[in-house]
Amino acid sequence: MGQLLAKILADIAAIQNSRRTNNPTLEAIATANNEEDKVKTAQQAQQEAEERLRKGIQPVVIPNPEEVAAAKARVQYQDNLFHFAVAGVAGSGKSSLVNAIRGLRNSDTGAAPTGVVETTAAIGRYRDSNRRLPFVWYDIPGAGTLNQPGWQYFNNQGLFVFDCIIVLVGDRFTQTDLAILENCRRFQIPTYIVRSKADFHICNLMNDMGYDNTQATVQQNLGDAKLPLQKVYLVSNKVLLSAVKKRTLPKTALDEMELLRDLLEEACARRCVAPEDENPEP
């Protein structure tokens, strides 16, 4: 655990001391739009997507510049910040996870509201409580079932603007979960699958299934959905809060430190340029 903590602190220092580059996904979308403009109109692209859908082929529909601008405005996107999204159905523990990862208890001032029934499709935006960190956390509402194709949900929510997306899952993936995972894969946006609820839920899960069986269940769900296998992080909000706020970990820690490490490593790899790399020697 000591090595993990040291790595996390080193990544935080690297992020604070580095220049942020543009989001590579948004750059790829802009390039694709420029190339596509040369060969087809937007109407032709839509017709092609609908034809592929009729044939059962999941289309990759590139957002146009207006859609990108609207999505960035909706989430108050800033080029010098990292934008991390937490997605999941209502009641999955998104707000509590957002609070814990920001080092806040649910009752603290500035914490995301918890225990409130989701009644809106609005995305919640929360700046990291440590203002020296260039992080913004978002609560992405999910209905659990989709009345539209997954790519439309993904594009309509503007999820392509985020640097990474944490997907909170239950015993089974919902259609929303699968839509996010599949389209993040298509747009090459990193995803992290997390099971996180109140501590007694995590304890019950471990008692009923054990760590390895929980991992196996999620891998089976991914395989059934024909998605690449990836790790699932078991996270206790109480442990995560302690790790972020006090830099301490109880013996009951599971994957909290690994989640923090992997998030920060991915952020560094995608968008950080160290000062010594700015002017390489000839």
Image (spheres, rainbow, N blue to C red):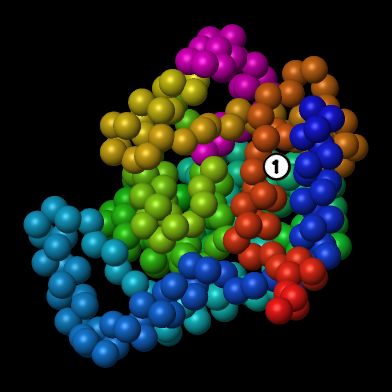
Q: Is residue 68 left or right of residue 246?
A: left
Is residue 143 rendered magenta in the image? no
The residue lying toward the viewer, choosing from 71 and 254, is 254
Is residue 211 rendered magenta in the image? yes
Name the element at disc 1.
helix
- Which quarter of the picture shows residue 220? top left
- For mark 1, does the 10 Å Cα neighbourhood hold few (<14), some (14 to 19), or many (20 or more) residues? many
Q: Position of residue 52 (x, y in %)?
A: 14, 63
Residue 31 appears anywhere in the view: yes
Residue bearing the label numbered 1: 261
Q: What is the residue that sits farthest to the top in this orientation?
A: 207
Q: Position of residue 51 (x, y in %)?
A: 11, 66
Q: Position of residue 216 (x, y in %)?
A: 44, 21
- Start-end of magenta stretch: 193-213
Q: What is the residue that sits farthest to the right in this orientation?
A: 246
Q: Position of residue 174 (x, y in %)?
A: 38, 39
From the viewer's perspective, is residue 174 above or below residue 180?
Answer: above
Residue 95 appears anywhere in the view: no
Q: What is the residue that sits farthest to the front in this orientation?
A: 282
Residue at 19% across, 68% down? 49
Q: Is residue 276 left or right of residue 233?
A: right
The amino acid on which the numbered mark 1 sits, given as a three-letter code, is Arg
Q: Is residue 268 left or right of residue 108?
A: left
Residue at 57% across, 70% down? 23
Residue at 72% across, 34% down? 257
Magenta: main secondary structure: helix
- Please identify the quadrant where the N terminus is shown: top right
- Please identify the quadrant where the C terminus is shown: bottom right
